[in-house]
Image (cartoon, rainbow, N blue to C red):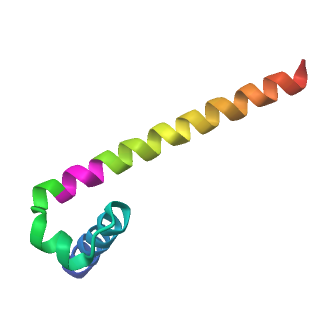
Amino acid sequence: KKKKKEDNFIYLQFFIAEKLGYTHREIREKMSVQELYTWNAYFEIKSEREEQAYERAKRQAQVRKVR
């Protein structure tokens, strides 16, 4: 389990680096673990909200087709 947790943390570092336009080294040097997890929470919430908006738009499009 420890290896999986380490792998997930490294993945998180690369994900945040990619999203913010940083290198992996810059993320490790400039960002605390707490900030990394805060960014992770932000991206999770953002993704959920985008998914909800997509589902709403899809439902609205289906309602329009029925009319």
Residue placed at 61% from the left, 38% from the top? 54
Chief SS of the magenta region:
helix
| Residue 1 visible in the current orientation | no
Q: Quick one: quadrant of the N terminus?
A: bottom left
The residue positioned 36% from the left and 68% from the top of the image is: 18
Which percent across, then down, holds residue 14? Answer: 31, 72
Residue 16 in sight here: yes
Which residues, given as a range, are shown in magenta? 36-41
User: Going by the picture, which residue comes out furthest to the top?
Assistant: 67
Question: Looking at the picture, does residue 64 appear above or below residue 57?
Answer: above
Residue 5 horizontal/vertical position (percent):
23, 72
| Residue 33 figure quarter | bottom left
Give the quarter of the figure containing the C terminus. Answer: top right
Residue 19, by quadrant, is bottom left
Q: Is residue 21 left or right of residue 52?
A: left
Residue sitting nearer the eye, 30 or 56: 30
In the image, what residue occupies the spot 26% across and 75% down?
Answer: 10
Residue 3 position within the rendered picture, expressed as x and y whole percent measured from the top left: 23, 82
Q: Is residue 49 above or below residue 5?
A: above
Residue 29 appears left or right of 59: left
Residue 23 image point, x, y percent: 27, 76
Residue 50 vs residue 63: left or right? left
